[in-house]
Image: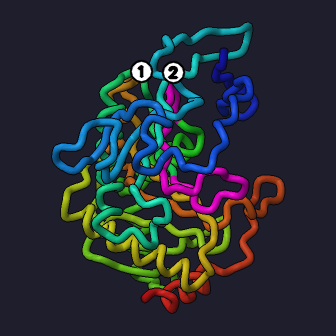
Amino acid sequence: MSDLRKDPTRSQWVLVRPRGAVGPEGAECPFCPGNESATPPEIAAYRKEGSAPNSPGWQVRVIPEADPYFRVEWDLVREGVGMYDKITPRGASELIIESPSHEDTLATMGPDQLERVLWMYRDRLVDLKRDTKIRDILITRRHRKPGSRLTHPYSRVTAIPVIFDDLRRELWESQDYYQYKHRCLFCDILRQELSDDERVVRLTPFFLLVIPYAARSPFETWVLPRQHACAYETLSPEIAADLARLLTGYFGALVTGLGNPSFELSLHTAPNLHSKILQGEWATISDDYHWHFEIVIQPERANRLGGIFINEVPPDEAARRLREAWQ
């Protein structure tokens, strides 16, 4: 049985689980239309009118992972093991198959299809947050991950009974900043970056795409909504369309300017506000937190020394090169 164990020296959670079975090898991609029987039954899908579940005719399809880290079927049990804390890994592990086309990428699928993917992100967050035993949900997208066997475009949704460590630190910093200045940290970053204008890559009616001031690695990029909101689920059709056009241009610039590098996109959004453990938890989150995307280029090459990231490309230079590559 897998379990989540807390390291008391770092206040970090570790998932301890037996090594999962490797999926079946085969010439055919299980995510391509016509191979729906090779995957677990779908959870949700956008389909052409008249097409049946678990058959061709879908535009975006969501399935459970075959060997999930977190399972909704498990009971949520919190227990102490002497001085240590342990929780069962109740949650969800899902894959969002982004396109019927095996060769699609975020740079080639087009704004309309990417908008469907972004909207499915929202749908999965809304659905999973109805479960009060789920505290946090992370949506990530890897491109050209070294060693990956599956190349069909997909995103991963991971829902867990605790707060992800990275988000917890970000929530604390945002809350501390708000308590001191009574302003949103990310709204202030928006104003600062627009004023400096050195690291801005693209500005749209609803978003700022920027290389952060202290980028942890070359070409790390943030996509910040210009309108304050703590949760991605507030996405509207107008904002989703603007975001899809922006991301299509950005991923195209990565191809033309950087030679189609590997990357990891992650959605940073508020945790499940219906799931509270401490009284007064998330009391100011609607004011102090700001959802956004973070994109790390070639995460497998991240350079660190004693926990300090080392970035060999100055952020203003990275922004200039991306601006020049934008078509």
Mark 2 touches mark 1? (CB < 8 Å): yes
- Residue flagged by tag 2: what amino acid is it? Arg
Figure label count? 2
The spot of residue 215 in percent (x, y) is 61, 69
Give the image quarter of residue 223.
Answer: bottom left
The spot of residue 83 in percent (x, y) is 73, 12
For the point 58% across and 45% down, the residue is: 166
The spot of residue 116 in percent (x, y) is 30, 56
Residue 201 part of the magenta-drawn span: no
Q: Which mark is residue 258?
A: none
Distance, label 2 to label 1, CA atoms, is 8 Å
Residue at numbered disc 2: 90
Q: In this view, does 130 lie to the left or right of 281?
A: left
Q: Which element carries disc 1, helix, strand or loop?
A: loop
Residue 156 part of the magenta-drawn span: yes
Q: In this view, does 247 lie to the left or right of 59?
A: right
Give the image quarter of residue 216.
Answer: bottom right
Judging depth in this view, the residue of 248 and 170 nearest the camera is 248
Is there any visible trace of residue 296 in the rendered image? yes
For the point 33% across and 46% down, the residue is: 56
- Quadrant of the drawing holding the C terminus: bottom left
Magenta region, residue range = 141-163
